[in-house]
Structure formats: structure tokens, C-alpha cells
Image (cartoon, rainbow, N blue to C red):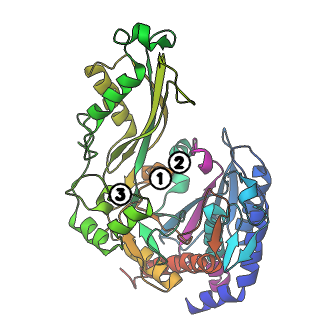
Amino acid sequence: MDDVFAYIETNRQRFLDELFALIRQPSISATGEGVEACAAMVLAAMSDAGMQTRRFESEGHPFLYGEAQGAVGAPTILVYGHYDVQPADPLDQWLSPPFEPTVRDGKIYGRGAGDNKGQFFAQIKGIEAVAKTLGGMPVTVKVLLEGEEEVGSPHIARFIAQNKELLAADLVYCSDGHHNYGSRPEVLYGVRGLLYVEVTATGPNRDLHSGNFGGMADSPIERLCRLIPLLKDTDNRVLVPGFYDDVKALSAADAAALADLPFDASAAAENIGLEGLAGDPLASPLEKRLLQPTLNVNGFRGGYIGKGSKTIIPSQATMKMDFRLVDAQQPEKIYAMFKAFLEAEGFGDLEVTHHGMMTPWRTPVDHPAAEPVMRAVEKGFGEPPYRVPSLGGSLPLAAFTQLGAPIFLVPYAQDDEHNHSPNESMGVENYINGIRTMAALIGGKGERAGGRDR
């Protein structure tokens, strides 16, 4: 890989300049601003890197596909990323204009710098470095980029289902997000899933005088308050029957990986202003954060909370909730359980609105396909990565489980990326190391195909 890494270093400034040009081009999926122009730029960049490219229309923004073919019978890597970005608001909190990339203290500031332009563009440049240095590809690399990740990826599952042959691969690789445990790189082996619901209780046909009707008319707020302790106990264990049926016990490999991660529970609690962390007292904080499912009440609205007093029994109350799911838990199944539970407990009259879902996915931390990924990240970043069993949050990568290949998430951005926030950034060296990592992964898989790493 010495010649490939030398090519990357020689072309360092050009790689940065090309990323800056991409960041200057807005691509806000929520509004559509600049998405078409950005898609054209990305297709051109993939073509310049030596890939055959295709554009696929969808009901939303287009999917972009590139392929660099390797030797017959060589492994195939499928890279996923997204070229859309979040809106830049609030503009007055940016220290430099969001679409004018600026380097300060070794970081590239701009909307999309880390989420996800800097990360998927590192993959494209890594492919270029290998192709131009070696005169060809030791493995086949496919790249799929979508333009709707920031609005929930509403069309990607169907696109994958309709294009399984095109997207067939031995390994699915994505770089998104940031380092969660300091500056050391990470390989993540899964993400938690998500089910989001809104529950509304309706009582009288109007707000009532609490003196005239108190004790006679039930309060919708109080009904929802009575529901919450039926849903979860004081250790945050969910009480919906069957909720844990598809949750696997912590494996020895998972336990070892968690034990290797630096996490100070006392410091974490202090950082968020709490005296201690809640949840199952028999589980470690990281197990609760990454590998256990949860139910969270996100918001509660109802009645009067203005200045002074207003003595009423409100006519309506609403709460919003999310379920974070793990292992084989399916959002549709959990939703049906939740609805059945409400009916059985006498809350069947509540109005439930389904606002969205994502399915969890896990690749076992001891999966053999992980080793070339771990080695590539170490070569790219210069130090061994943490082996992280899961991400606490959710991403649409579960859609790729349809392909039957192991999935790995390797964030390139630094821990203070500030994705979705003003002053989003990606470290210059993180970007360059990401290019090196992608090149090393291609080279490592090529060596394995050649029999040197079986």
C-alpha cells in the first residue's frame, strides 16, 4: 500500500479542494435546494475516480451508483453514503458561512463536511487512489449514494429490494457519524432500531371548570400519567408483554468489546447534570446504552401551563414516545404489541399515531469479515480501532440486510463533529485518514482474494 498512500499524500491538496467544492454546493433534501446540482457533481466525481456510473430516479431525490470492477471472482465491497445535508439554520450561530468551507484549527467547517460529504467523498478518493496507482482494482467496489437520508430514507428499502443483483456484495461498508470514545477510531457492528409513536387522550368535548366538574370528569392528562407506570418500571424495564422476546443475551464477545471501551459512568452522569445513571442495576452502562431496548417519553402536552393559574380539566392531552430496539426486534411487531397492550389495559380508546420506524441490525463482533475492516482502519488512522457492538442511535442501514452480507459502520469524523448543528466540521486529518482507510480496505480484500489472507 506504500505507493497508494504516497499517491494520497501527493494529491492531498487536490482532494481537499474537491471536497471544498462539494461542500459549497447545497443539497438540502428537506427543501430540495441544490440537490440536483450536487447529484451531478457527485456522479462526475465518481466517473473521474474510474467508476462506471448510473443515476436512478425515485419518488424523491435520485440514487447515485458507481462501480469499479475488479478481477473475476474477487470479493465485492458495497459502500453506502448520502449526499444530502441538513438545513443550515440557525444561520446566526455559524462562525463562518455554512456553505463556505473554512479550515480552522485543523478542521473543515461547513454544512455536510462530516455528515456525510467528507465521509463518502473519502471513499471515492480512496477508490481513485487504488485505481490510479495500481492501474486497476483488486476487488470490485460498488458505491450507492442516496439523497434522502436526512429526511428518513423513505425509498431506500424498496430500491435495494428492486436491485439486489446490482447491489450484491460480500461486505457492506458505511462511514457516517463520529467517534464516540475520544480520538481513537471505531468499527461499529450494529445500530439500534426505532419506533416512534404519538398517543392522544381525549376527554370532555371542551376544557371544563375544575370546581364544577372536578371528581366527575376524568382528566386526559391524568389518564396518560396513569399509563406511563404500566409501560415501564422504575428500572426502565418495559412492561409490555413479549417486548423482550427477540432480545438476545449478552454474548462473551460483546461483553469483551464493551469492557474495552473507555466509559466513566460517574463522569457521564456529571456531564449531563445527574447524580447517577438510571436503568437496570444488573447491566453495565454501555450495555444499557448500546445493546438493550428502551421506551422513552419524549414530550407531553396538555392543559394550561401559562402564567398564573387557570383552573380547568383539559379536554385533551398528548405524549410522544420512542422505542429503541435491538437484535431481532421488529418495529411492526413491537407496534402491534403496544396497541394490544393498550387495549388489554383499558386504554384502547387512545388515539395512536405511528410517526416512523427503523429496523435494528447487528453483525456479530467476532464475524470473520470484520478482520480486514479492523486492519484497514488501523492502517488508515495509525492506531487500532475500538470494536463497538452497536450504536445507541438509529440509521437506515438495516435495509441492506436484504443483501445477506455483513454490515460495518466506520465513522471517520472526530468526536466533536457537531453534525446537524451549527459549525459542523470534519478534521482535515480525519478526511485524509478516511481516504487511506478505504484504500487499505480495498487492498486488504484484494490480498485475501489472492490467497495471502485466507
Looking at this view, name the residue that lies furthest to the front.
308
Closer to viewer: mark 3 or mark 1: 3
- Which of the image's four quarters has the C terminus? bottom left
Q: Distance between the residues labelled 2 and 1?
A: 7 Å
For label 3, the SS is helix
Three-letter amino acid code at the position of disc 2: Ile
Residue 322 in view here: yes
Closer to viewer: mark 3 or mark 2: 3
Residue that carries the numbered disc 2 in the rendered image? 160
Mark nearer the N terminus (2 vs 1): 2
Asked if the residue under mark 1 is in contact with the one under mark 2, i.e. CB atoms within 8 Å, the reply is yes
Residue 359 in view here: no
For label 2, the SS is helix
Depth check: give the residue in front, 261 or 435.
Answer: 261
Q: Distance between the residues labelled 3 and 2?
A: 30 Å
Depth check: give the residue in front, 147 or 427.
Answer: 427
Q: Distance between the residues labelled 3 and 1?
A: 24 Å
Instruction: Give the residues in magenta.
Output: 128-155
Three-letter amino acid code at the position of disc 3: Arg
Tag shown at residue 400: 1
> Which residue shows up at 40% across the image and 59% down it?
190
